[in-house]
Amino acid sequence: MKIRTLLFLSMSAAMAVQAADPPEVFGTAGAVKGYLDEPFNFAGGAGARIPLVDRLALRPEFLIAEEPSYSHRYFLGSVTYDINHPRRPAVFYLIGGGGWVEVRDKRIPYSFGEGEFVGGAGVRFALGSRITLSTEFRAGKSALPLVTMHLGFRLGKRR
């Protein structure tokens, strides 16, 4: 019963505080090195940034990295924390999370999946009231490193 009460109070507090930014969808382009002995490959995908409170946001994301012999598909769920205030033109943030990576061998009918965790930092620039441009560096278990750029579109106006 105590856990339910604590959960209810924390959810109520989170709902009472409104985030300065509306939700955002973004397209991603960058480079990933799937494993240390592999070369860098182009990675592309899409995701969303869903602010919970002023500095904290959820970020689901999907990335694909193709190479001649293998393809990597990343399904990531991350949390971002803005270091400086989110109303500034340039916002530095920390990112951490986890998910699933699926690796397919194109030469033979074989694929496998494994858990993934990534962490890093980035900077998000406001290019107007609705457009953002972010760049970040992340590293994790199967992404060593993941360097990406995001072009985002806010689904509403900032408060």
Image (tube, rainbow, N blue to C red):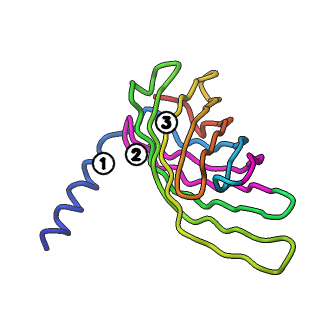
Task: Name the residue nearer the viewer: 120 or 144.
Answer: 144
- To which residue does mark 1 refer? 14
CA gap, disc 1 to disc 3? 24 Å
Task: Name the residue nearer the viewer: 153 or 104.
Answer: 104
Q: Quadrant of the N terminus?
A: bottom left
Under mark 2, the amino acid is Leu
Residue 79 to residue 2: above or below: above
Q: Which residue is outermost to the top?
A: 89
- To which residue does mark 2 refer? 52
Image-based side of 84 in relation to 10, left or right: right
CA gap, disc 2 to disc 1? 7 Å
CA gap, disc 2 to disc 3? 19 Å
- To which residue does mark 3 refer? 121
| Residue at 60%, 36% in the rendered image | 154
Residue 83 is drawn in which quadrant? top left
Under mark 3, the amino acid is Ala
